[in-house]
Amino acid sequence: MTGPVNDQQAKTPLCPRWEARADLVVIGSGVAGLTAALRARELGLHVLVVTKAAVADGNTRWAQGGVAVVLDGERDADDTVEKHTADTLTAGAGLCDEDAVRSILLGGPAAVNALRANGAVFDHESGGLSRTREGGHSAFRVIHAGGDATGAEVERTLVAQAGERRIPVLEHHIAVDALRTPAGEVSGVTVLDRNGVPGVVRASAVVLASGGIGQLYQATSNPEIATGDGLALALRAGATVADIEFLQFHPTVLFTPGARGRCPLVTEAVRGEGGTLVDGAGASVMAGVHPLGDLAPRDVVAAAITRRQALAPGGIDDHVFLDATGIPGFAKRFPTVYAACQALGIDPAVDGIPVTPAAHFSCGGVVTTADGRSTVRGLYAAGEVARTGLHGANRLASNSLLEGLVVGQRAAEAVAADLAAGLLPDPSRGRLPERTSAPAAERDALQRVMSRYAAIGRDADGLAAAGSVLDLSTQDSPLWTHKAVEDAALTLVAQAMLSAAALRTESRGCHVRSDFPERDENRWRRSQVIRLSPSGQPVLAEAASLEGVA
Ligand code: SIN
């Protein structure tokens, strides 16, 4: 059944067909999830990973550029973690949590060294690791693997380790809702298998590592699984989310007319190694826009491309070009991008690569500490689903794999510490959710209005129009299939984003308002925090909730 439900059906109790137990259940099998699971196992916890695709099919494997990290003996002579911190704060446009930034970046070298010790192979050149630059970085500190296949190497390493250590993984199961104790603590999750058969995992702790929300838009660099399920689960479990209006658009995905769904990324490292953005007439897109030119922070480059496309002499253009003809050995250095170009008959050695911005990364998410504790006891989050304060209003390139490695590990350590301190709930006290339905909009309509009104260049009228369309196309639907769970998650996250974006009457980082083009430091140098009202609507909470993590 996929249509709307009546009140009786909405309250039909969930009848799980099976039940499992663990100390810790991890939702998601990307870099943050598998890192958390592996560390939990090392600490002697019984861990179960739940993932809605196959274990290696998360967002991580699509990451191209690399891992930003300042390693001893593998860095520019004058580079330091302090400089990496400064670049991250600049990119974050005033909304990073400086303590979290410093703490996570300081944890980077040990996390990367551990990954290498466990078999990850990064690219070398004479004298050490190859390092590149990406937008917003003041030094060559992005290490990479397989040329432009860094995420695939990270994922390969973690999946292999998880296999060797026999970590149980429930593939093709989607987490639906949290079990909660009478005191409101999270103590497990309900899940559906690919046929919609319900089950329950009882656990003292849940670590959300479910990735991003790119499928809110028609074109994205994210795979189909990036539907915001973890964010929605956290909101329904009473957690707070913040900075949700800051959805980062990657400046360059490969343009194909009318493209929908996941579009091939053209890594920023292409610009790091000399590629330049030009319009259809061959004029530079970034000249005079920012002192770092083509390597300006991502929000600046994506907005500049969008403006240039809108101002094309013949009317609105749908792409610009990345001129990489001066990069020697392009096919070897960027094999993934090269293969995607070849499939379209483009040879980057002689042709400009047609590119356009697309939805890429959620800078906001479930509010957590730098070690993954959320505002609800028993619930932790790591990776893209979390808002640790590392990214602020705009993530610095290649900080996300690093965050997944560092916070994934710390989240497992936080669970172990909280369990040992007797702070976590008895899983047998967790109750099944009372409602088994949620409002869901038709996905195509949702993606259309979000792409039109909530991308780069928003205004009050457009955001209101998007909200109305969503309201009109939303019906209460039973959460009985993967698609229904995803549609409900996309709907809730879209509502939260539209509310936060409408309230933020300024432009900052990835949030670009055409009716408020300036940054407003007096009023808006602060995060917006959202939670669910008793009737299930995303509403603004006191910003003090940012400090109230459990
Ligand atoms: C890229 O390679 O440009 C994407 C990497 C990232 O999103 O950090």
Image (cartoon, helix red, strand yellow):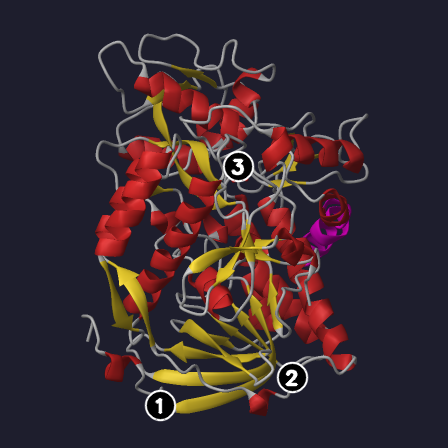
Which residue is under mark 2? Answer: 425
Main SS, magenta residues: helix
Which residue is under mark 3? Answer: 147
At horizontal 36% and vertical 28% (from top left) the residue drawn is 356
Q: Earlier in the sequence, mark 1 or mark 3?
A: 1
Q: How many marks?
A: 3
Q: Earlier in the sequence, mark 3 or mark 2?
A: 3
Q: Examine the rendered structure and indicate whether residue 539 appears above or below residue 214.
A: below
Q: Examine the rendered structure and indicate whether residue 22 appears above or below residue 100.
A: below
For label 2, the SS is loop
Instruction: Tell me the distance, in whole angstroms, between the alpha carbons under discs 1 and 2.
Output: 23 Å
Which residue is under mark 1? Answer: 15
- Three-letter code, disc 1: Cys
The answer to whether marks 1 and 2 mark residues whose Cβ atoms lie closer than 8 Å is: no
Local packing at callout 3 (Cα closer than 10 Å; few below 14, some 14-19, many 20+) is many
**Left or right of 511, for residue 397:** right
Local packing at callout 1 (Cα closer than 10 Å; few below 14, some 14-19, many 20+) is few
Foreground: disc 3 or disc 2: 2
Hey, which quadrant is residue 194 in on the image? bottom left
